[in-house]
Image (spheres, helix red, strand yellow):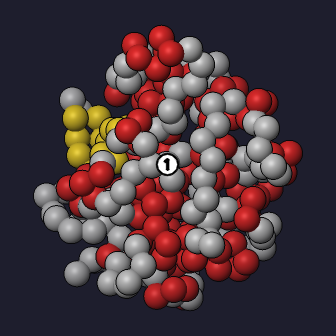
Amino acid sequence: MKADLLERNPLDLTFDKTIGAKSRGPWTDDELRRMFGHSLFSARMAAVPHWQDVAPSDGRALLLLLLHTGARIGEIAQLRKEDFQTRNGVTVIRITAEAGTVKTQESERVVPLAAHLLADPWFTQWLQEIPGGTGSAFPSAWGRARGPGDTMGQWFHQFRKDAVLPEGALEGSHKFRHWLRSSLAEKHVGEATMDSITGHSAQGSAGRKTYTAAASLQTMLEALDRIDWPKITAHDGHATPKAKE
C-alpha cells in the first residue's frame, strides 16, 4: 500500500460514514507545533537527514504548500516550476494533469498562495528561484521508478517519526486537507469556495454539480487569508534555500 497517499474525498467530516472515520481528523495545535518546530524549519535544516534521498529544502517547501493549500501530496510533489504563476497580481499554483496525475476532473485547479505563506522569508526566497524555469519544482523527488507522490509520501512517513507525530494510515498527509477545510469552515467560508481550493468534487444535488463554477482567485485568496495560521517556528533563524541545479 502506498504510504500517505490514500485520500478520501469528504465534503463534510460530520457525514463521513467510512470505516475508521471517527479516527480521522485535522492536525491538532500540538501536532502542528511539533511539526513546524522541527529543525527542518530552522537554520539547521541542512543537518536534517535526506530521507528517501529527498533534499530537506524540497521537504520543507512541500509541507508549507500542503498546509497552505490543502492539496493532495501527489498534487504538490509533481508540481513543475512552470506551475508557479502570477495571475492578475496573485501568486498561484496550477494543479493540472499535464504535470502528472489528478484524482478527478475537479482536481484540476488554480490555487492562490495565502499572504501568510508569502510572508515566510524562507519560502519567499525558495519561490524566487522558481519563476521562468522549467522542470520539477522538487527535483530530489524524481528519478525513480515510483512517482514523486510515492516518494514524498514515504519521506513524510519518516519525517513524522522524527517529529514525534502520530503514526498510522490515518495520520498521513490527508490531515492537511482536513485541517484546511476545518479552518475555512470556522471562518464561515462557503462549501463551493472550499471545494475550489481543495479540489473536492461537489456533493449534494445534481444541480450543484452541474452549475457551480469555480470560485474566483480573489474569493479563494480572501478565504485563505481569514485563517488563523500556525506559527512556522525557526528557533535559530531562517535557513537559506540552496540553489536548485
In the visual, does 1 lie left or right of 54?
right
- Asked if residue 231 shows in the view, the reply is no
In the visual, does 101 lie left or right of 9?
left
The image quadrant that residue 138 belongs to is bottom left
| Placement of the C terminus among the 4 image quadrants | bottom left
Q: Secondary structure at mark 1?
A: loop
Q: Measured along the vertical axis of the image, is residue 158 above or below residue 223? A: below
Query: Residue drawn at (66%, 43%), measured in percent from left and top?
Result: 178
Query: Residue drawn at (20%, 55%), measured in percent from left and top?
Result: 82
Q: Count all numbered tags in the image, as a single digit.
A: 1
Query: Residue drawn at (56%, 51%), measured in percent from left and top?
Result: 67
Whole-percent x, y for residue 229 in the image: 61, 42
Q: Nearer the viewer, residue 45 or 67?
A: 67
- Asked if residue 145 shows in the view, the reply is yes
| Placement of the N terminus among the 4 image quadrants | bottom right
**From this viewpoint, which residue is outermost toward the left?**
132
Q: Nearer the viewer, residue 44 or 109?
A: 109
Instruction: Name which residue type carries label 1.
Output: Ala
In the visual, does 71 lie left or right of 16?
left
Residue at which label 1 appears: 71
The image quadrant that residue 39 belongs to is bottom right
Q: Nearer the viewer, residue 193 or 65?
A: 193
**From this viewpoint, which residue is outermost toward the front?**
206
Q: Measured along the vertical axis of the image, is residue 147 above or below residue 112? A: below
Whole-percent x, y for residue 119 in the image: 44, 47
In the visual, does 20 lie left or right of 94?
right
